Image (spheres, helix red, strand yellow):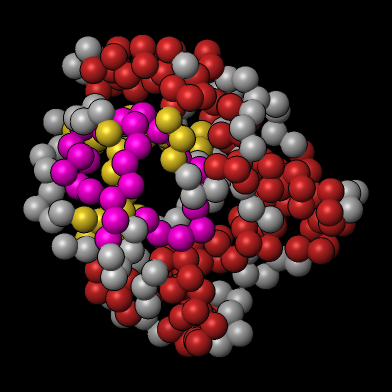
Amino acid sequence: MGFMQRRPAAPLDALIEKIWDWDMPAAAHHFERVLPQPGAQLIINLCEDETRVYTDEPQRHCLRSSGSVLGGPRLTSQIIDTAEQVRVMGVMFRPGGAHALTAENQQALLARDINLEDLFGAAARQLRQRLLDTAAPGMRLQILEQWLLAQRRGPATDPAVAHVAAALDRAPQWACIAKVVQQTGLSDDSLRMRFHRQIGMGPKRYARLQRFRAVLVQVHLAGSVDWCRVAADGGFTDQAHLVREFRAFSGLTPGAFMARRGPHLNHLVID
């Protein structure tokens, strides 16, 4: 039992940040809040043939999907059920990586979980069975990586989209989007259309999300935080602007995040 992850070999490393295998006892708490990320994620549940996510309060409704799903990029947090997070494998795509693998329009997948069999047919069902039949986590990771390489059907990453995304990743708080787009030689509308199709959102919203995530990284392990300084350094107009953005993306205030943070940056204990 344990947790194992690795970065895939080329050429998948350009599309995928990591492939992981989680085999751990059930958590003491029931729910976790998962914070949004710009890349899609593939989840394969090897404990139950089901994936459950929940709507936020005041009424927490359960949304059920297949045990193998491709989760599109997200702009808000979601709540997961830890009872099914016992034996799970996953793939964290780089922004645009899922489009390059599947050729699916990422804007259509935004904040949605799609049954992997709807995308890959019997190959997805056979993959899950092979993983269920494989005891060693390292071998499971190898099987999943080989399967991803064999299933690739999408186009190469658009250089213009990659250029703009990389610039916003480096400095989401300061990058001038208009100037970066101008460097591609494309019109605003053309670049925006490509960005939506391949990454799932426009450049401005992508920059906002990455700016929020830069704050998460900065404060996650901090003992105490000067939020006025964080707001100024992060490119927010003031602390109130930071709080609004934090609520929009996480569903929490910065103070609530600090109170609930744990060892994993993107997962917060609820109850």
Tell me the quadrant of the picture where the N terminus can be found: top left
Q: Position of residue 95 (x, y in %)?
A: 58, 44
Q: Position of residue 105 (x, y in %)?
A: 64, 37
Q: Which residues are magenta?
A: 60-88
Q: Is residue 119 above or below residue 162?
A: above
Q: In terms of depth relative to the viewer, which is nearer, 104 or 183?
A: 104
Q: Residue at x 21, y 55 (%)?
A: 31
In the rendered image, residue 255 lying in the magenta stretch gets the answer no
Tell me the quadrant of the picture where the C terminus can be found: bottom left
Q: Position of residue 46 (x, y in %)?
A: 24, 27
Q: In screen coordinates, is 196 left or right of 97? A: right
Q: Is residue 82 above or below residue 224?
A: above
Q: Residue at x 50, y 38 (%)?
A: 93
Res. 199 image quadrant: top right
Q: Is residue 179 above or below residue 231?
A: above
Q: Is residue 263 visible?
A: no
Q: Residue at x 50, y 19 (%)?
A: 120
Q: In screen coordinates, is 102 left or right of 270? A: right
Q: How many marks?
A: 0
Q: Position of residue 132 (x, y in %)?
A: 23, 17
Res. 129 image quadrant: top left
Q: In screen coordinates, is 38 left or right of 130? A: right
Q: Residue at x 24, y 74 (%)?
A: 259
Q: In terms of depth relative to the viewer, which is nearer, 113 or 74?
A: 113
Q: Is residue 178 above or below residue 243?
A: above
Q: Is residue 157 visible?
A: yes
